[in-house]
Image (cartoon, helix red, strand yellow):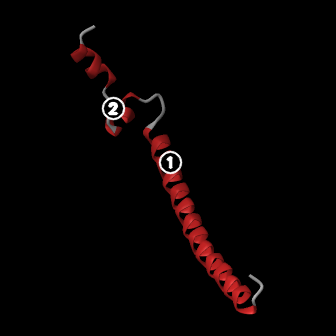
Amino acid sequence: MKMKEYKEMMKTMTEHEEYKNADVPKEVWVQRNEYLHKHIDRLYEEIKELRTDNIRLTKQVEDQLKQFRNSGSI
């Protein structure tokens, strides 16, 4: 097998080619994509919440350290 033939064979399919060659109806692909987009949105929101929570916790720790330093405990 020549390199050119190999590269052509290993080329990734476009979304349209996947729909055309798939064993499942296009509606299933559309539902799957909608599900994945919703899942990604949920993960994005969860990450935003975690970042906000981390910022709040960092501030709490810094404030507590200041209190310990001011009281002479550290």
Vertical placement of 3 versus 42: above or below? Answer: above
The three-letter code of the residue at mark 1 reads Gln
The mark closer to the camera, 2 or 1, is: 2
Mark 1: give few (<14), some (14-19) or many (20+) Cα within 10 Å.
few
**Residue 50's disc number:** none
Q: Is residue 71 left or right of residue 40?
A: right
Vertical placement of 14 versus 39: above or below? Answer: above
The residue sitting at the left extreme is: 4
Q: In this view, does 11 lie to the left or right of 57?
A: left
56 or 13: nearer the eye?
Answer: 56
The three-letter code of the residue at mark 2 reads Met
Vertical placement of 13 versus 59: above or below? Answer: above
Q: Position of residue 40 (x, y in %)?
A: 51, 56
- Residue drawn at (63%, 74%) of the image: 53
- Residue drawn at (38%, 35%) of the image: 19
Q: Is residue 48 left or right of residue 61?
A: left
* The quadrant where residue 49 appears: bottom right
The residue sitting at the bottom extreme is: 70
* The quadrant where residue 10 appears: top left
- Callout 1: SS: helix
Label 2 vs label 1: CA separation?
Answer: 20 Å
Q: Position of residue 1 (x, y in %)?
A: 28, 7
64 or 57: nearer the eye?
Answer: 64
- Residue drawn at (71%, 89%) of the image: 67
- Residue drawn at (59%, 65%) of the image: 46
Query: Would you name the residue on which mark 2 appears?
Result: 13
**Residue 31's disc number:** 1
Vertical placement of 9 versus 36: above or below? Answer: above
Mark 2: give few (<14), some (14-19) or many (20+) Cα within 10 Å.
few
**Circle nearer the N terminus (2, 1):** 2
